[in-house]
Image (tube, coloured by chain):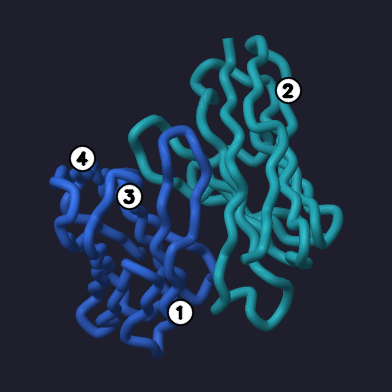
């Protein structure tokens, strides 16, 4: 299957700092990527949809100024957690589908996830 | 609003047993349904993808069925092994392209 890579896999930061997480599709182009967060022992909650070349669309209750998403190319989307606080500590996972046509009906591939710990 | 429910939340079985995990969804207008496996602290591994026009998919000891009209899917695991221990997540995709997840079933297979 297709490969989606996330970096870093783990990051620890101090409260008030910003952290950037990268999501790359390694062997396919993705016009759309999705960002999820997962709290311990809970399921994945969709945060936002990242669209190449345009603004991301955020789910209700997700602060767009807090979680900045940039999808500058067909293989890279970034999530920046700005002014991070301990309550932002979570597991962040991205997913991507192949570009065009199959984007809605096709399979989504997931990254390995990034665990953020804010002290 | 699509809601996905998985039952049971947790399951413990002895090695060798066949088992069924259940997934239900409230809006039958879906494009596909995926079953994933997640090991503790890890990302998601896609197990099976069923398009809305399909009834089932099989991969090795895994078989997933889909009854779109009733909003149900099952994941059947044959001859379970300790290595199957993980959390299994069901997710459905609607016309927005978004994947909506269930809460998962945590499976423990005891040797």
Which chain gets the blue colouring? B
Left or right for A90, reference A109: left
Q: Are marks 2 and 4 on the same chain?
A: no
Which chain gets the cyan colouring? A
Mark 1 lies on residue:
B31
Q: Which chain is indicated by disc 3? A: B
Residue at disc 4, secondary structure: loop
The quadrant of the rendering that contains the C terminus of chain B is: top left
Mark 4 lies on residue:
B111
Dots 1 and 3: beta carbons under 8 Å? no
Mark 2 lies on residue:
A18
Residue at disc 1, secondary structure: loop
Left or right for A53, reference A89: right
Mark 3 lies on residue:
B84
Q: Residue at 48% across / 60% down in the picture?
A: B46
Where is residue A28 drawn, in percent x and y? 76, 66
Where is residue A53 drawn, in percent x and y? 83, 61
The label nearer to you, 3 versus 2, is 3
The label nearer to you, 3 versus 4, is 4
Left or right for A5, reference A43: right
Dot 1 or dot 4, earlier in sequence: 1
Q: Which chain is indicated by disc 1? A: B
Q: Residue at 64% across / 67% down in the picture?
A: A97
Q: Is residue B60 above or below residue A8?
A: below
């Amino acid at each position: 299957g297709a490969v989606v890579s996330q970096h870093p896999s783990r990051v620890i930061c101090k409260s008030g700092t910003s952290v950037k997480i990268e999501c790359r599709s390694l062997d396919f182009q993705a016009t759309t990527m999705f960002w999820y967060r997962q709290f311990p022992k809970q399921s994945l909650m969709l945060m936002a949809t990242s669209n190449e070349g345009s603004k991301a669309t955020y789910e209700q209750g997700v602060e767009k100024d807090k979680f900045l998403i940039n999808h500058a190319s067909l293989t890279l989307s970034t999530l920046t957690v700005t002014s991070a606080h301990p309550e932002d500590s979570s597991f962040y996972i991205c997913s991507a589908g192949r570009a065009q046509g199959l984007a809605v009906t096709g399979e989504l591939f997931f990254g390995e996830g990034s665990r953020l710990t804010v002290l | 609003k699509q809601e996905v429910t998985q039952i049971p939340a947790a399951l413990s079985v002895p090695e060798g047993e066949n088992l069924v995990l259940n997934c239900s969804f409230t809006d039958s207008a879906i494009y596909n349904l995926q079953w994933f496996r997640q090991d503790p602290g890890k990302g998601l591994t896609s197990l099976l993808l069923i398009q809305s026009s399909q009834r089932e998919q099989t991969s090795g000891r895994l078989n997933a069925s889909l009854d779109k009209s009733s909003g149900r899917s099952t994941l059947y695991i044959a001859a379970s092994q300790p290595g199957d221990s993980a959390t299994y997540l069901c997710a459905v995709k609607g016309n927005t392209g978004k994947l909506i997840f269930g809460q998962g079933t945590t499976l423990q297979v005891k040797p």
